[in-house]
Amino acid sequence: MRVAERTTHDAGTPARAGAVPSVPAAVVPLRRRRGTNREGLEAGRRSTRTLLWVLLAAAMVLYGFPFLYLLFTSFKTPIDTIAVPPTILPKEWTLENYANALGRSGVPASFINSIQTAIISTVLSLVLAVPAAYGITRYKTLSGRIFIMAALVTRMVPPVAIGIPLASMMASMGLADTPIALSIAHTTISLPLSIWLMSSFFEAVPKDLEEAATVDGCSRLGALWRVVIPVVSGGIAVTAIFAFLASWNEFLFALLMTAIRSQTTPVVIANFQTQFGLDWGSMTALAAVYSIPVILLTLLLQRRIVAGMTLGAVKG
Amino acid sequence: MRISDRRFALFLMTPAALFLAVFVAFPLFRLVADSFFKISPIAGGPRDFVGLDNYFRAFASEAFTGAGWRTLAYTLVVVSLEFALGLGMALLFTMLGRSSQIWRTVFMYPLMIAPIVAGLLWKFLMIDNFGLIGTLLHQAGILSNPNQIGWLSDPGIVLYSVAIPDIWLTTSFMCLVLFAGLQNIPGDLIEAARLDGARAPALLFRIILPLLRPVIAVALVVRGIDAARAFDTILIQTNGGPQSASETMSLLIYRTMIRFGDPGLASAMGTIYLLAMLAVAFFAVATIWRPGKDN
């Protein structure tokens, strides 16, 4: 009984300054609704559930198979890779493709470039998006509303349309073929998304929190830095992952803006096709090495990522 | 001295606004400006003002109108299939409840894969001769010969084949967003409808889909914009071929700019493309979303 009382109380007055940041209180009604929904749509009958599990198993096999096939292929011998007819499993398991792919000149350097570019872009994106999103959500000014609309419109700009002018701008700034130039280009993609995500996270922070801090003598900037940022650190992590992934997987800007020195791995993977003939074995090996770290990262942080992905869309 | 809240908000937004102005708005301005010039592809070459000539040339060229229709067809196929599959999976996960949580996570994995890798992988699966899909369909007795369907070599179907990696990559996104939307539908509402004798189809079309409308609108618009800009997956699979049958707008603009060295014409195409995307997105938001009208 006491628990129920407390939840309704907290949900009604979501901001009790001094208490532990009351964001969890705002989450409580959501959880409870989720509970009632289970009675709503969740299937109860055992036969129905069995059928649903069978359907799910079929869908998972179909959906998971392509990547498994990529992995199996990467362990085949180079000749087996393009055997007719193809087999699913390697006849003979070997690391030959991995040795070929990673030993090729330019490949290790491209990994370093990818990591560098993604990190610079993530930091840049956060440094710009966090204060901007805070300004937009906390002080609902006209300029803020116009700004978030403009940021959303930027999402519609086809990269191919600004890639060339952007590349020539970077060249005239003396940044041609550098990770900095490419990370700036990647930030044009991740910044609007980061502002959008961070805005939804700041929206969940009760305003009284930093009002209490300013009464205690904090400046507004100090309140943001010392009180609000720690509360939304989870949201910042989600945003960072998205910015990182956007840069890590990006191809078109990397193709237009890099030559030898700053080429990232997606460009190298694509180049395998023309430069070295059709070396499918090495390509699958390199693709596996490039994808697996981020897939594992996702599985580890899945809860946070799901939250980030759905927050903006569901809040609409 | 304490500056006003309005100024403070502006101060917080300025760095990001400046960044977007310099690195997005300015290149866009350059793009629109370039569309009125005939530009030599050689750096420092001549640059002559030609008014709307590039726009007339764009609309007169079959490559441009063809790419426009192909982009539209590609986007419709990708988004509608993703929506149908994503909704199916979201309902499946909702009906199975919490016990399916781990599979929901696993289902998300393609979202983390680079589009270039996905395009490459599916090219490898669909390629003539040693592609696995043709072989499996042949072994299952569906095809009389493994190469009967030229997934990536038959101009009649290639546009739909190149869409497969895109669908595979982002059905998870559609599923996640719709799943989250489903969690927000009050359970008593479903119960009440059931008590009133509503069967599954009525439940889906009369209750669930209308309630999900805002979520669906956001998901469709976000994915529609991305699908209309698809580039990596198509470039690596077919480079627009055969016979331009899979050449969508992004590819055409890229090729006009880089391969055919006509930046003026490419800029005009890019400008038209951007305007069309903005118009469609606003129209879609206004008609599907209808904020405020459902409550």
Image: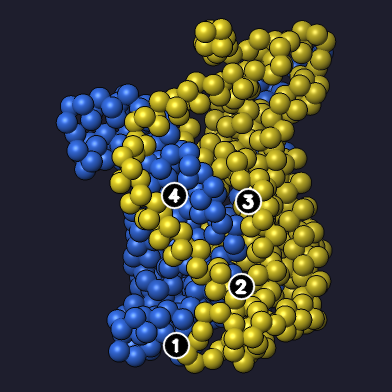
Chain colours: A yellow, B blue
Q: Which residue is mark 4?
A: B174
For marks 2 and 4, give the one nearer the viewer.
2
Q: Residue at x 41, y 43 (%)?
A: B96
Q: Which of B121/B106 is in front?
A: B106
| Residue B27 screen position, x and y as percent | 62, 56
Q: Is residue B145 left or right of residue B183?
A: left
Q: Residues within 10 Å of mark 4 (few under 14, many from 20)?
A: many
- Which amino acid, by three-letter code, is at mark 3? Leu
Q: Is residue B212 left or right of residue B269?
A: left
Q: Are marks 2 and 4 on the same chain?
A: no
Q: CA distance from mark 1 to mark 4?
A: 31 Å
Label of residue A299 in the image: 3
Q: Are marks 3 and 2 on the same chain?
A: yes
Residue A47, above or below B180: below
- Which amino acid, by three-letter code, is at mark 2? Leu
Q: CA distance from mark 1 to mark 2?
A: 20 Å
In which quadrant of the rendered image does the N terminus of chain B lie? Answer: top right
Q: Residues within 10 Å of mark 3 (few under 14, many from 20)?
A: some
- Which amino acid, by three-letter code, is at mark 4? Met
Label of residue B42 in the image: none
Q: Are marks 4 and 3 on the same chain?
A: no
